[in-house]
Image (spheres, rainbow, N blue to C red):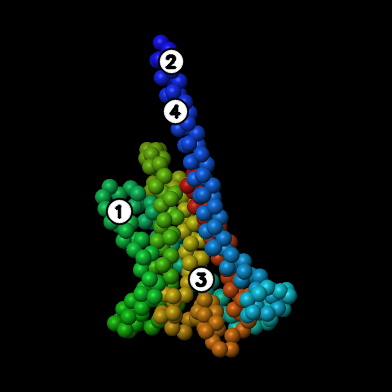
Amino acid sequence: MTLALGTNDGISAELRAAVRRERRLGTLAVRLTLLGGFGITFLIYAPVLWLGVLSISLDPLSGFPGPFTLQWYRSLFDQPAWVQPLIRSIEIALIVSVLCIAAATLVGRVLPRMAHNQALLLGGFLLPLVIPGIVIGINVFIFYRMLIGWKMGAWALVLCHFIWAFPFALLGMLVVSVRFDGRLLEAAADLGAGPWRRFWDIERPLLMPGIMTAGLFGFLLSLTELPRSIFVYGRFQTLPLYTWAEASARASHIPLIYCLNALISLVSVALSVLALWQLGRGARR
């Protein structure tokens, strides 16, 4: 009896020690994850914050902040040359956003319901993510301009931006649509609701986070797109193309390079946070 009891006490002590080790490892893993997350976040946003600081510095070309001033922003708004490219970028981005919403909603609703070839189709839709942007721009230029003879311009920008933005829009939609309960549609059909009524009254509200995420991704990625645009813009100059040309010129304008890019970065970060928030909201739903 004493021997058995001693054996049980030994096993219990080993179990408690194992549990303590697991807890310590779990705590260490959480701390390392948080440290890594904060480190990656710093690497992403530190250049954006530094650009904003330099944009209000008296001599931003020195690379060191201060003394601080807003004169570069005042000079920026006194130069109207960037306004027209900004308007064109917004127009292109709005068109791409609408196309991403329509395409992602259509594909994102149908793809999870398919019994076969889901992985094959999804891989085909996501393939532009691994193709370099310059390659896509060159391919579009060679095929449509050199082989077919179409002039480059706004439509070519919309096409290249859509090719780039659609995979992100689709992923945002799939986060929501794969969790959709198809029995809701079956119940609505049993009650006499038609296809359009089922979509508008049942699917649309539940898929709205994915729809908004698709639109935000389409708008944001189009608004800041440069590598694919270089080969296809023709005479339709967008804001990224304009800032790239100004930054490449010998007579660069300090307000344009620093202040305008700081404003673009601020808008891009805000839209990215909004898109990720919508995506997380849809996942929780």
Residue 79: percent from left, percent from top: 65, 83
Residue 77 against residue 197 in the figure, above or below: below
Residue 171: percent from left, percent from top: 41, 56
**Dot 4 corresponds to which residue?**
14
Residue 283: percent from left, percent from top: 47, 47
Q: Which is more foreground, mark 3 or mark 2?
A: 2
C-alpha gap between disc 2 and disc 4: 14 Å
Q: Determine the residue located farthest toward the top in the rendered image.
A: 1
What type is the residue that disc 1 sits on?
Answer: Ala
Q: Secondary structure at mark 3?
A: loop
Q: Determine the residue located farthest toward the front in the rendered image.
A: 3
What type is the residue that disc 4 sits on?
Answer: Glu
Query: Which comes sooner in the sequence, label 1 or label 2?
Result: 2
Q: Residues within 10 Å of mark 2 (few under 14, many from 20)?
A: few
What type is the residue that disc 3 sits on?
Answer: Thr
Residue 153 against residue 265 in the figure, above or below: below
Q: Residues within 10 Å of mark 4 (few under 14, many from 20)?
A: few
Q: What residue do we see at 39% from left, 54% from top?
A: 108
C-alpha gap between disc 3 and disc 1: 30 Å
Q: Residues within 10 Å of mark 1 (few under 14, many from 20)?
A: few
242 sits left or right of 102 in the view: right
Q: Which is more foreground, mark 3 or mark 4?
A: 4
What type is the residue that disc 2 sits on?
Answer: Leu
**Dot 2 corresponds to which residue?**
5
**Residue 119: mark in rendering:** 1
**Dot 3 corresponds to which residue?**
224
